[in-house]
């Protein structure tokens, strides 16, 4: 027979099998193979066996089995009692078990989930009282679960799992497989360890392989300049590589998509001649809202929208600056505006909070440099008291750009916006009138994506009520948008939470931005 070209580990394994006086036609286990070939690395044995199988000389037979053991929460439940077991025991000890009493007897993180577990067992809540239509059935199921956890304590295999016997009953669990499935649905209760055993069988073709072809040879797998400078390559045997086979994808480090997008935005702003501005998260309500002509009774200032701080509870502000804000808010100051009327409170201005937008930092920068033309940007975190859902987070990023210079106008703002978004990969941009408390005129920015116009941010020129009290005489152009919204657009997501889930497989599949 024509002998196929074998690698040295394949030659050794086949040679050992053929020279074994007590030839095992039932197959060689991994332990027998390692001992027979004097190997310590299982990877070498597996590689050699599969290589021989590809040539039809050896057959690799795999058997798979599972071992089930308790995870950390399962061990904790076995030691201190299942949650539903402890709640049910408490119920049985009460004359009239009520939800109010249960919440007093158990921690909040146990009472809520525990009632959910009991309801699935037939416990109902009516007029604040907990009752069970069939207490015996509830007790039976709970006892079965506890017994099964005890059975898993030292670990059991598939075969032992089949030995688990319980009375059929009318409960929701009737056999060991259902118990395993149930506890697997409760995170941290059961661990499943998969085991794969391999046996290597010599085939008829392998038994006929010419033994003289199994001598070790020097096989060259890497060609270097030093190797070619000598004559040894003339008589060497070179390892063959099949270039048509699929190669494994290298797992190299890379930036998170959000960080990559931030770096891309930074590079665009820097190309356009902007400087980056970075400042503190903790600010006063005065700079965060009063300076931007947001009335002190505006709904956005309430606790429902803003994170106010206990430590520090207030931040000292310059009295002259607060007097300027007071004049603006109450009667418009010297700007020609009528202001908001009412009474301005310096105590409200001093309240400490987590900034709700990055404009608080740019307006402070402009106040410190009221006469210097500038182009600055920031990409940083802001905080608002939002309920977490597919489009909202309480902590997110805001992108902001500011231009202050003599002669700045609306046309310059629109042109800058179109240039920025074109560099970001969205050449079709349009603006339409909008309202924002501290800009006039105000614009909403829309880009065309997959044939539809999507609103991505707001823009405008700061009102005189914002700039004049701080000594700023040049027009100030400003625009901003949410980074997460842009990330969802770029990555094609419909749930903002995906950006912050540590899903390595999803991260590996994301494009390089």
Image (tube, grey):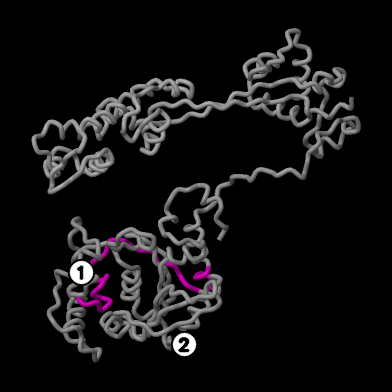
* Label 1: how many Cα within 10 Å (few below 14, some 14–19, many 20+): some
Q: Which mark is residue 411?
A: 2
Q: Name the residue nearer the viewer: 370 or 196.
A: 196
Residue designated by label 1:
317
The residue carrying pointer 2 sits among few (fewer than 14), some (14 to 19) or many (20 or more) residues within 10 Å by Cα, namely few
SS of the residue under disc 1: loop
Tell which residue pokes out farthest to the bottom in this image.
336
User: Looking at the image, is mark 2 or mark 1 nearer the viewer?
Assistant: 2
279 inside magenta stretch: yes
Q: Is residue 301 magenta?
A: no
Residue shown at 66%/25% (left/top)?
A: 61
Residue depicted at 62% across the width and 17% down the height: 31
User: In the image, residue 197 lies at what x, y percent?
Assistant: 59, 23
Q: Quadrant of the N terminus?
A: top right
What's drawn in magenta, residue-wise? 268-296
Instruction: Find residue 4 and report its horizontal and vertical position in percent.
Output: 84, 29
């Amino acid at each position: 027979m024509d002998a196929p070209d074998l690698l040295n580990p394949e030659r050794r394994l086949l040679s050992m099998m053929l020279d074994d006086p007590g030839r095992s036609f039932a197959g060689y286990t991994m332990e027998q193979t390692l001992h027979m070939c004097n190997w310590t690395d299982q990877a070498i044995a597996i590689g050699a066996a599969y290589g021989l199988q590809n040539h039809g000389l050896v057959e690799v037979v795999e058997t798979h089995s599972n071992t089930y053991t308790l995870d950390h929460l399962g061990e904790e439940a076995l030691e201190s009692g299942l949650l539903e077991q402890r709640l049910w025991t408490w119920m049985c000890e009460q004359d009239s078990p009520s939800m109010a009493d249960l919440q007093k007897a158990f921690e909040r993180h146990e009472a809520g989930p525990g009632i959910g577990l009991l309801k699935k067992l037939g416990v109902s809540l009516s007029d604040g009282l907990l009752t069970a239509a069939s207490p015996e059935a509830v007790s039976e199921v709970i006892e079965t679960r506890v017994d099964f956890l005890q059975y898993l304590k030292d670990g059991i295999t598939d075969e032992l799992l089949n030995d688990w016997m319980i009375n059929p009953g009318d409960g929701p669990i009737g056999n060991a497989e259902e118990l395993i499935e149930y506890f697997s649905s409760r995170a941290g209760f059961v661990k499943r360890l998969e085991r794969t055993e391999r046996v290597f069988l010599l085939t008829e073709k392998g038994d006929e392989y010419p033994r003289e072809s199994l001598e070790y040879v020097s096989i060259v797998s890497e060609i270097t300049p030093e190797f070619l400078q000598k004559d040894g390559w003339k008589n060497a045997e070179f390892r063959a590589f099949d270039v048509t086979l699929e190669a494994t994808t290298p797992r190299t480090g890379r930036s998170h998509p959000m960080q990559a997008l931030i770096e891309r935005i930074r590079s665009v702003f820097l190309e356009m001649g902007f400087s980056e501005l970075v400042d503190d998260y903790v600010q006063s309500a005065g700079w965060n809202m009063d300076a931007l002509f947001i009335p002190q009774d505006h709904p956005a200032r309430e606790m429902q929208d803003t994170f106010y701080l206990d430590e520090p509870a207030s931040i000292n502000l310059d009295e002259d600056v607060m007097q300027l804000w007071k004049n603006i808010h109450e009667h418009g100051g010297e700007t020609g505006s009528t202001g908001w009327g009412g009474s301005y409170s310096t105590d409200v201005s001093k309240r400490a909070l987590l900034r709700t937008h990055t404009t608080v930092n740019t307006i402070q920068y402009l106040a410190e440099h009221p006469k210097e033309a500038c182009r600055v940007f920031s990409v940083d975190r802001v905080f608002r008291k939002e309920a977490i859902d597919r489009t909202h987070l309480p902590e997110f990023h805001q992108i902001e750009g500011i231009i202050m210079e003599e002669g700045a106008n609306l046309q310059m703002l629109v042109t800058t916006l179109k240039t920025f978004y074109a560099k970001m990969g969205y050449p079709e941009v349009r603006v339409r009138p909008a309202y924002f408390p501290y800009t006039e005129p105000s614009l909403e920015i829309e880009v065309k994506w997959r044939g539809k116009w999507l609103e991505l941010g707001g823009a405008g020129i700061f009102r005189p009520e914002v700039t004049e009290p701080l000594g700023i005489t040049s027009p100030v152009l400003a625009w901003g948008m949410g980074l997460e919204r842009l990330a969802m657009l770029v990555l094609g997501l419909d749930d903002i939470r995906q950006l912050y889930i540590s899903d390595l497989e999803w991260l590996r599949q994301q494009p390089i931005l």
